[in-house]
Image: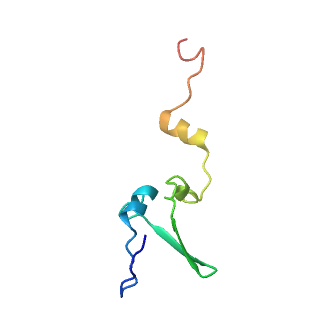
Amino acid sequence: MKSRLTEKGQVTIPKQLRDSLGLEPGQELEFEERRGTLVVRRVAPADPLRQLLGLVTRRADVDAYLAETRGPAWQAGQDGE
């Protein structure tokens, strides 16, 4: 399979390759030069949970927060068993 480089540096990936590799419009690709050869690979989508790491910088006492928002915990004998 062949494709021609445009004046803008664009290349069309042949449909047969796009289909067999599962490449879709808008998919991010990564380019690398390795010993004179162009290597193209799919960029794995970022894990949405990993993107949250580091957002919360202050420490929090979860038990204190739950007690504050829910009220005191249930206690046998005091809450009408």
Q: Give the side of residue 27 with respect to residue 33, left or right.
A: left
Vertical arrangement, residue 56 with respect to residue 78, above or below:
below
Q: Residue placed farthest to the bottom in the image?
A: 7
Snapshot quadrant of residue 67: top right
Q: Quadrant of the C terminus?
A: top right
The x and y percentages for residue 63 are 60, 38
Residue at position x 51%, y 32% in the image:
71
The x and y percentages for residue 42 are 50, 63
The x and y percentages for residue 54 are 58, 60
Q: Give the side of residue 12 with respect to residue 52, left or right.
A: left
Instruction: Please name whichever residue, 46 or 63, is drawn nearer the observer in this view of the structure.
Output: 46
Vertical arrangement, residue 70 with respect to residue 49, above or below:
above
Residue at position x 38%, y 67% in the image:
14
Instruction: Please name whichever residue, 51 or 66, is drawn nearer the observer in this view of the structure.
Output: 51
Vertical arrangement, residue 44 with respect to residue 31, above or below:
above
Residue at position x 61%, y 45% in the image:
61
Q: Residue placed farthest to the front in the image?
A: 1
Number of numbered discs on residues: 0
Tell me the colour scheme of the image: rainbow
Instruction: Please name whichever residue, 34 or 3, is drawn nearer the observer in this view of the structure.
Output: 3
Instruction: Please name whichever residue, 41 or 65, is drawn nearer the observer in this view of the structure.
Output: 41
Q: Residue placed farthest to the top in the image?
A: 81
Q: Quadrant of the N terminus?
A: bottom left
Q: Give the side of residue 37 with respect to residue 45, left or right.
A: right
The x and y percentages for residue 2 are 42, 74
